[in-house]
Image (cartoon, helix red, strand yellow):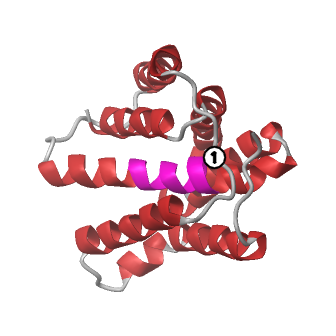
């Protein structure tokens, strides 16, 4: 069944606003804002936007057992990337880092793999997969730099493929949580 978002022009404005919010993160944090509170507020707003936008049709979701192999492939891809690519030096695993990283993962997936994916789906599954992955990658450039773009495109493609393969944004959310935790381990 095709997903059709209510009010497509307003949906496009929300996609643009959510992406702009993520792109502007460094500027907002630079002005002396409390980073944890500011980021938490931004991610809660993004989560709510992604979850509460009305849909005209439901998305068929496969059985939970079918999601397990897709979850395993996604987590395995990020684990392999962490092992091969290195990443940051291990840090003390503070509760704030775990909670904020998990909130960021769930919020971004609700936004990109539920809302943006659904907004692009009327143009076809390929547009939904590649478009949501590209937007996901681009919004991370202002935080991490241009060097991370190919990595985030790959990450976005894995997460968007999971969305396509399962029909649910929840599997990519779980994978994204694990990926964020792997960065700090």
Q: Nearer the viewer, residue 28 or 171?
A: 171
Task: Determine whether, in the image, residue 25 is placed left or right of residue 36.
Answer: right
Q: Quadrant of the N terminus?
A: top right
Task: Determine whether, in the image, residue 180 is placed left or right of residue 24.
Answer: left
**Magenta part of the chain:** 105-115
Query: Visible in this render: residue 58?
Result: yes
Q: What element carries label 1?
A: loop
User: Residue 36, image x and y in percent?
Assistant: 24, 68
Tell me: residue 23, above or below residue 115: below
| Residue 171 lies within the magenta run | no
Within 10 angstroms of label 1, few (less than 14), some, or many (20 or more) residues? few
Q: Residue at x 22, y 46 (%)?
A: 98
Q: Quadrant of the C terminus?
A: top left
What residue would you read off at disc 1? 58
| Residue 110 lies within the magenta run | yes
Task: Determine whether, in the image, residue 172 is placed left or right of residue 9.
Answer: left
User: Residue 162, image x and y in percent?
Assistant: 58, 30
């Amino acid at each position: 069944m095709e997903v059709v978002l209510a009010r497509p022009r307003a949906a496009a404005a929300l996609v643009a606003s959510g992406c702009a919010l993520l792109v502007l993160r460094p500027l907002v944090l630079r002005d002396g804002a409390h980073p944890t509170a500011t980021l938490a507020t931004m991610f809660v707003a993004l989560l709510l936007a992604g979850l509460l936008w009305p849909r005209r049709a439901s998305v068929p979701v496969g059985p939970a057992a079918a999601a397990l192999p897709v979850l395993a492939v996604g987590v395995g891809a990020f684990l392999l990337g962490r092992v091969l690519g290195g990443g940051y030096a291990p840090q003390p695993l503070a509760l704030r880092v775990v909670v904020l990283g998990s909130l960021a993962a769930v919020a971004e997936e609700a936004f990109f793999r539920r809302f943006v994916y659904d907004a692009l789906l009327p143009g076809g599954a390929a547009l939904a997969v590649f478009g949501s992955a590209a937007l996901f990658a681009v919004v991370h450039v202002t935080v991490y730099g241009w060097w991370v773009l190919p990595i985030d495109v790959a990450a976005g493609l894995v997460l968007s493929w999971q969305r396509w393969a399962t029909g649910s944004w929840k599997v990519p959310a779980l994978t994204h949580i694990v990926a964020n935790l792997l960065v700090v381990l």
